[in-house]
Amino acid sequence: MRKHFGEIISQLAQVNIALWHEEDNARADDDHLVAQAKRRIDVLNQQRNDLIEKIDEITIELSPNHHATSVTSVPKSLGSEV
């Protein structure tokens, strides 16, 4: 594991808090401030998504059967209906 699971969870919490603050800033009456906040929200959302993907990867690595089945695989019973 490149980074400790707890560190990534902590980073996600920090990004979420920053995101909430920017969302509050995006409710300002000043269009210039709203535009700045929206750009920062875009950056923070990308960081949030990247961290969630890392959490998913680590969770899969730590699962006892992570080599057995892909998360995106389709059960045979569904066949081509998906």
Image: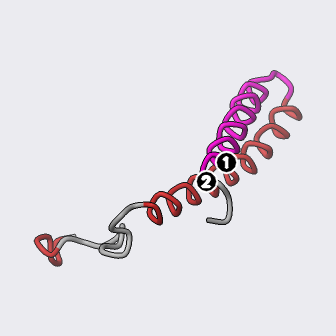
Q: Main secondary structure of the magenta part?
A: helix
| Left/right of residue 77 with respect to residue 22 in the rendered view | left
Give the alpha-carbon distance from disc 1 to disc 2, as whole Å: 6 Å
Q: Quadrant of residue 38?
A: top right
| Label total for image | 2
Q: Given the image, on which type of amino acid does mark 2 rest?
A: Asn
Magenta includes 12? yes
Which residue is found at the position 46% from the left and 61% from the top?
62
Which residue is found at the position 25% from the left and 72% from the top?
74
Task: Give SS at disc 1.
Answer: helix
- Residue 23 position (above or below residue 68): above
Res. 53 mark:
none
Q: Quadrant of residue 41?
A: top right
Expressed as whole percent of the image width and height from the top left, the position of residue 56 reads 50, 58
Expressed as whole percent of the image width and height from the top left, the position of residue 81 reads 16, 72
Image quadrant containing the N terminus: bottom right
Disc 2 target residue:
49
Range covered by the magenta-colored residues: 5-30
Pointers 1 and 2 in contact (CB under 8 A)? Answer: yes
Expressed as whole percent of the image width and height from the top left, the position of residue 35 reads 82, 39
Which residue is found at the position 79% from the left and 46% from the top?
39
Task: Give SS at disc 2.
Answer: helix
| Left/right of residue 82 with respect to residue 69 in the rendered view | left
Disc 1 target residue:
45
Expressed as whole percent of the image width and height from the top left, the position of residue 16 reads 66, 37
